[in-house]
Image: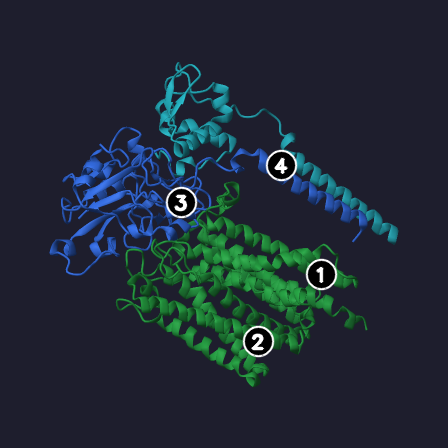
Chain colours: A cyan, B green, C blue
Amino acid sequence: MRRKMKIKEGILIAGGLLLFFFAVTYAFWQEGEAKKIPTPTAKAPDKHCVESREYMRSSHMLLLDKWRKSAVREGERIHVTPDGREFEKNLSTCFECHVSRGFCVRCHSYASAKPNCFECHHEM
Amino acid sequence: MIEKAFKGDRMYWGWIVLLLVIISAGAFSYLNQLTTGLTLTGMSRDVSWGVYIAQFTFLVGVAASAVMVVLPYYLHNYKAFGKIVIIGEFLAVAATIMCVLFIVVDVGRPDRILNVMLYPTPNSMLFWDATVLNGYLLLNIVSGWTVLSAERKGVPPPKWVKPVIFLSIPWAFSIHTVTAFLYAGLPGRHLWLTAVLAPRFLASAFAAGPAILILVSTILKKTAGFDAGKEAINKLAVIMTYAAILNFFLLGMEFFTAFYSNIPGHMHGLQYLYFGLHGEGQLVPYMWISMIVGLGSVLVLLIPRLRTSMPWLIAACIGIVVSIWIDKGVGLIIGGFVPTPLEKIVGYMPNFNEILITIGVWSIGILILTVLLKIAVAVKTQDQVKA
Amino acid sequence: MNENRREFIRKTGLGVLAGIGVASGIIPGSSFEKVSASPAHGDEATGVRLGMVIDTRKCRDGCTRCIDVCHEVHNVPDFKGTKDEIKWIWKDPYENVFPGESLQFLSEETKEGDFIALCNHCDNPPCVRACPTKATFKRNWDGIVTMDYHRCIGCRFCMAACPYGARSFNWRDPRPAIKKIDQAYPTRERGVVEKCNFCSERLSQNMKPACVAECPEGALTFGDLNDPHSEVRELLKNNHTLQRKSELGTRPSVFYII
C-alpha cells in the first residue's frame, strides 16, 4: 500500500518536472529564425549622426540622458563631436534628420522597449 | 517566532480577514489614484497637502511616543513597564510603517521616490525626515524583536541590544522634531512659522501616544487576556495628563503671541481655524470640538479618582486622541495653507477615494500591530500555557 | 534556529550591506552633486542674475496677452476652475499680490487694478531649500530657479515652501487640457510640479521671455540685475520699486513699479 503510494508520487513528480522543463524551454522548440530587425533610415543618410551608428543603436538613450543632464542642470547646451560639428542638445535636433517618429517606434516595438519620452516630448 | 501569529481563535482570524478586506478596498483606490492621478483627492494648488500628510504628522507622534515607556523602563529601571514596553515598541513599528506609506501615497511620482536617497540633499528637511524615520523603524524592530525572542527562550537579551535601545530614545525625539521642522522652517506660512511647533508636536505626541497605548492594552486585556498591569496603566495616565496640559499650554502661547502682537499674518491662521476669516470657517466646529473634548479630558485626568477608574480613563483617552487628531491631523495642515500666501480662503475636503486610501493605510498599520502583538502576547504568556 | 542557517543569513546580510555600500560609491548618480542647492548671492553682485521689472502703470486692465502667450508656448493646460489649476503667470488684485503692504487709503487705481504675479526667481529661494532631490534648483550661471521635470518626485514640499503661490502641480494628465500643443516645448507628465522658467528655452535662442516680448505696452523689462548698465538696473535707478514680501529675505528678482 505504502509502496504503491510512493510510486504514484514518483510519477506525479517526474511528470510535473517534465512539464515544467517543457514549459521553460518552449521558446527554443520553435522552428525558424527570428524576424528581421527593421532598419529605419534617416532622412539624410549621407550625413553622420553625433556618434557612430553602432553606438547610437545600442546607447542612444545614455547619450540623451547625458544631454539632458548637462543642458538642464549645467547649462551646456551645445554638443561638439570629435570632428568638430556642433549640435544643440535637444530631442528636436534628432528629429531634424530622423524625421518620422516611426524611426523610434519600429525598433522600440521590436525590442519591446517602452520609453516614456513621448509622453511629454514631440507629439506628432 | 512568526509562527505564533498563525495560531488564533475564530475572532482573531475574523479580525484579520476584516482588515484584509478593508486593505484591498484601499489598494484598489490607490490603483485608481495611480492611474488617474492625485486629482482624485481634494487637494489643489493652494491646499497642496491634505489628509495624507496630516495622518503622517499625527502618526510620527504616535511612533515617537514609544519613548514614554522605553525611557522609564530601560533608563530608570521602572519595572512596572516591563510588560507594556514591547507594546509600545511594536506600536511604534506599526505607526512608522504607516508614516512611510502615507508619504508614498501622497507623492505624485512614487516610482521615483528613491531619488531622495539617490540625490541626497542635506538642506531639505524631507531628506532628513526620510532618514530618521527609516532609522527609527529599524531600531524599534531590532530592539523589540531581539528582546522578545530572548524572552521566548528564557534567556537574558544579548548585550548589544542595550545600546540600540538607548539610541532609540533620543532618536524618538528626533523624528518628531524633524517632522516639525518640515513645517516650522517655511517662510510665509505663519501658522507653522513658530519655534514652539516642535515642542508642541512632542507634547501632543506624548499625550496621544500613551492614550493609544492605554486603549490598546485595554483591548488586549479584553481579547487576549494579557494584562499590562494596573500600575503601568496608571503611570501612563499621569504621563499623558502632564503632556496634554503642556500641549494646551503651548497652544495658548500661540494664541497670545498672535493676538497680543496683533500682526495680521500671524493671526490669520488661528482666526481661520477657530473663528472663521472673511466669513469662511470650514474647520471652526471641528477645532472647537477638539478644544472642548481635549480640555474636558484633561479635567477628567486631573481628578485622581476619575483617572484611576477604568471607564473614565478610557473615555479620557479617547477624548485626548480625538482632540489631538483633529488639531494635528486636520487643523495644523489645512491652517498652514489657508489663508494662502495670496491671502485667499480656499476650501479643502477629502474625496471618497482619498478617504478609502487613508483607511486602507490605517488598516495596514493595525494589521501589522495585531500580528506583532499576537506574537508578543503568545511569548509573554507561554509560561502560563505550559503550566 | 539551526546554527548553519543562522550563520548563512548573517553572512548573506553582511554581503548585501557591503554591496550596497560599494555600489553607492560607484554609481555616479548617487554621489553628492556639484549643483549647489541654494547659492544665494551675497550683497555684492557676482555673476549674472536675470530679473524683471514690471511697470504696473503701463499694464492695461483686462489685457491678458502675457498670460495667454506664456501658457501657449509652455503648453500650460487650462482646466476650468481652480481644482486642477496650473498657472505660470496670472493677475490678482493688489491686496493679494502684495499682502504685507499697506492697504489703507489706497489710490483708486491701485485698489481697482490687477497686478501680474509670477515666480520671483528668488536669489535665496525657499523652494530650492525644501526640495529633497534637487529637482528644483537655482542655475548658478544666470540665477534662474528652474525645474528638472525628470527628477521631481511630486512631494509638493516646494509648493508649501513658496511664499508666492507660484508653483502648480499636475494633478492629472495635462495633455487633454492643452488646446494646441507647441512642439518647441515639452508638455509635463502627471505627478510633477511646474512653474515659470523665465523662458530659459527662449533665452538659449537669444530671444526675450515670451511675456516680455509680447506685452503690447512694453510694461515688462528683462535683463541682468547684476549689470549696472542693464535696462532693468536703469529702471530700478530711476523708479521706486517693490519686491513681493521682501521681509522674508528671499530676495525676489522680480521688481514692481507701482
Name the residue carrying label 2.
B238
- Amino acid type at circle 4 is Val
- Amino acid type at circle 2 is Val
Q: CA distance from mark 2 to mark 1?
A: 27 Å
Q: Is residue C55 left or right of residue C49?
A: left
Front of the two marks 4 and 3: 3
* Contact, mark 1 vs mark 4 (Cβ under 8 Å): no
Judge whether residue C181 can be spotted in this image: yes
Name the residue carrying label 3.
C128
Residue B155 pos. (x, y %):
79, 62
Circle 4 — which element? helix
Q: CA distance from mark 4 to mark 2?
A: 49 Å
- Amino acid type at circle 1 is Val
Same subunit: marks 3 and 2: no
Name the residue carrying label 1.
B147
Task: Looking at the image, tell me whether mark 2 or mark 1 is earlier in sequence order.
Answer: 1
The residue lying furthest to the left in this view is C108
Residue C31 pos. (x, y %):
53, 37
Circle 3 — which element? helix
Same subunit: marks 1 and 4: no
Front of the two marks 4 and 2: 2
In front of the other: C129 or A68 = C129
